[in-house]
């Protein structure tokens, strides 16, 4: 069986070019999550999980795709039984070729080529001639099958399709999966996460089902598919579409809700507000209305296409290595674990998820075991922003930092570093920024305190831009202790870092020397840093590694034993009191053992 990939155009699925289809099929057989192909000069990404084609750099332009299995074409061997029969007659047994055209041996040559009428009678007597040949001439029957192996394969190939009914229509599962995922996305855009989760769960069941689904009744046998979903499956397979899904696509409000939520930080409520109060329905309209946006929304809008592009696995590893170096240089050092789909072995990720903690004995906590008032995450963010690793802060509080980051391949040329300066003002400015972000302020001059501090340093040092000697080597490593640092007196990275709110409106590649050392094609990637108490570290790495379905199964196992498992602890299910553990949790394996589950490595947690 061969596979042909098709894309939906003008309401009908049409096949890709054979070369494109073969490259897609090769990636599918290798088990990859997606493949990038070029069509008419533009690049597209085929997502096998969603069975969709998305334009590279503009994921809003999507089309459903379909994988269709088909038997090898039988049309070519059927019309050509006579040509193969003609060559073997002259080649293996020249003497036998003469007696067959008994009347005129010379006429055997013109029969195949110049006289079509003579070629016509040959096929009809050919089958009966095959039967008598073995009887009068047993020696001639033996050479006929041996010298003509090509004649044997074409005969059985058309036979099975004729003897057995054609295979069921291919692509049913792919169509059902795409339909369920689209319903999930609509529900997610509406803010109904519970219903969205149900559709996603059903989509996973269909994706993992090997047999072809022919009806809603069969679909209902799968986990997560109920009566209503089964009815939608019947409607899809019988009519080719689902009316309720078509109505949702045609509703302007639904399209607006879905489009606006492409921006990080804009949820269903905020999207509804922008649409109903300001009439904003597209990202272009949002970009043209900066006054209605919050500051973090401006930054997220700037990087919306970068954030939607998948991050290759090697790039995730490189970015984490830079972050880990800075975390190790922190005072006191921070432990870091790269979580998310990358830890589960995915070839690409949507974002970079990192869990941080202060090493045991260094973490300063209060009676409740929480992080102390000293803000290590804000200090780390300040250090990373100075070095140019973070290009925009989207959200920051005591325990969570969401930002845009980007790789650098070379270092900008800058003057030598001045004497170390205290960094207290650095993290205080970052903390002030976080407070304003949390309040949702949209003032244009939120960072006067930062600018005043910057001016004060410039006046005292007499330098307008200084660099860390470490930065001159192209590294992102710095000390973020409160007392001193080896970094520059002027906390300035490439243009746009620290000067403007969240780096909005600043082009990193603009200006003399701005963005030096940055690769022009490098995308900004979303990175999420989460700082947890040391006692919660392994619970957090387990939770943020995922998958969500896997952690849900762990919570169910814990519940059966009377416990509640969260990203922070294992507690009694009845009174939420901390469990008196028989031993200290020093790794994820301990958590599995406490809830009675066999340990599952991260790469096998993709439920």
Image: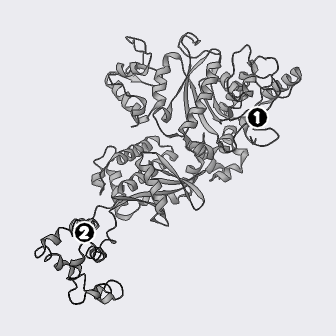
Left or right of 33, for residue 363: right
Q: Position of residue 62 (x, y in %)?
A: 53, 55
Q: Residue at x 63, y 14 (%)?
A: 332
Q: Secondary structure at mark 1?
A: loop
Q: Residue at x 43, y 40 (%)?
A: 194
Establish if 575 lies above or below 309: above
Quarter of the image with the C terminus is: top left
Residue pointed to by mark 2? 155
> In which image quadrant can residue 130 be found?
bottom left
Q: Secondary structure at mark 2?
A: loop
> In which image quadrant can residue 398 be found?
top right
Q: Position of residue 585 (x, y in %)?
A: 43, 15
Q: Position of residue 477 (x, y in %)?
A: 67, 23
At label 1, counting other C-alpha atoms closer than 10 Å, the crowd grade (few under 14, some 14-19, many 20 or more) is many
User: Of residues 280 and 585, which is closer to you in this image?
Assistant: 585
Left or right of 405, for residue 132: left
Residue pointed to by mark 1? 494
């Amino acid at each position: 069986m061969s596979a042909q990939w098709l894309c939906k155009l003008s309401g009908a699925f049409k096949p890709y070019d054979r070369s494109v289809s073969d490259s897609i099929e090769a990636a599918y057989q290798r088990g990859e999550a997606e493949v990038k192909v070029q069509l008419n000069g533009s690049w597209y990404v085929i997502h096998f999980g969603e069975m969709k084609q998305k334009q590279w750099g503009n994921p809003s332009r999507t089309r459903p795709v379909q994988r269709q299995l088909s038997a090898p074409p039988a049309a070519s061997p059927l019309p050509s039984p006579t040509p193969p029969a003609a060559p073997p007659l002259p080649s293996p047994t020249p003497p036998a070729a003469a007696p067959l055209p008994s009347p005129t041996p010379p006429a055997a040559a013109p029969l195949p080529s110049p006289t079509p009428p003579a070629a016509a009678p040959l096929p009809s007597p050919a089958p009966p001639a095959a039967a008598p040949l073995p009887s009068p001439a047993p020696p001639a029957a033996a050479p006929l099958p041996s010298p003509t192996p090509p004649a044997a394969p074409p005969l059985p190939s058309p036979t099975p399709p004729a003897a057995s009914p054609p295979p069921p229509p291919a692509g049913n599962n792919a169509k059902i999966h795409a339909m369920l995922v689209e319903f999930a996305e609509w529900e997610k855009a509406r803010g109904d996460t519970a219903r969205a989760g149900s559709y996603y769960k059903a989509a996973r069941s269909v994706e993992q089902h090997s047999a072809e689904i022919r009806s809603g009744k069969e679909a209902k046998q799968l986990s997560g598919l109920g009566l209503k979903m089964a009815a939608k499956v019947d409607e899809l397979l019988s009519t080719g579409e689902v009316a309720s899904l078509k109505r949702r696509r045609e509703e302007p409000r639904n399209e607006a809700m879905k489009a606006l939520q492409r921006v990080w930080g804009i949820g269903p409520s905020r999207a509804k507000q922008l649409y109903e109060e300001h009439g904003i329905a597209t990202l272009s309209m949002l970009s043209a209305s900066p006054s209605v946006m919050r500051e973090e929304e401006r930054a997220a809008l700037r990087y919306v296409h970068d954030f939607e592009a998948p991050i290759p696995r090697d790039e995730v590893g490189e970015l984490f290595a830079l972050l880990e170096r800075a975390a190790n240089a922190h005072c006191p050092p921070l432990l870091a674990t790269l979580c998310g789909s990358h830890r589960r072995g995915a070839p690409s990720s949507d974002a970079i998820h990192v869990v941080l903690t202060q090493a045991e004995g260094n973490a300063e906590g209060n009676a409740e075991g929480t992080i102390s008032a000293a803000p290590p995450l804000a200090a780390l963010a300040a250090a990373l922003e100075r070095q140019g690793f973070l290009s925009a802060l989207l959200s920051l509080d005591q325990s969570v930092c969401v930002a845009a980051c980007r790789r650098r391949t070379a270092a900008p040329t800058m003057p030598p570093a001045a004497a170390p300066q205290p960094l207290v003002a650095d993290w205080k400015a970052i903390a002030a920024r976080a407070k304003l972000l949390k309040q949702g302020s949209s003032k244009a001059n939120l960072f006067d305190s930062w600018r005043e501090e910057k001016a004060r340093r410039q006046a005292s040092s007499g330098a307008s831009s200084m660099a860390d000697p470490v930065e001159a080597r192209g590294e992102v490593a710095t000390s973020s202790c409160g007392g001193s640092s080896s970094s520059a007196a002027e906390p300035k990275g490439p243009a746009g870092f620290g000067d403007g709110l969240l780096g909005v409106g600043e082009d990193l590649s603009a200006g003399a020397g701005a963005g030096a050392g940055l690769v022009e094609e490098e995308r900004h990637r979303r990175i999420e840093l989460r700082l947890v108490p040391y006692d919660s570290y392994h619970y957090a790495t387990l939770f943020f590694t995922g998958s969500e379905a896997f952690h849900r199964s762990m919570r169910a196992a814990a519940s059966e034993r009377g416990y509640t498992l969260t990203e922070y602890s294992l507690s009694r299910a009845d009174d939420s009191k901390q469990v008196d553990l028989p031993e200290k949790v020093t790794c994820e394996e301990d958590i599995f053992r406490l809830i009675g589950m066999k340990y599952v490595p991260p790469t096998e947690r993709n439920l």
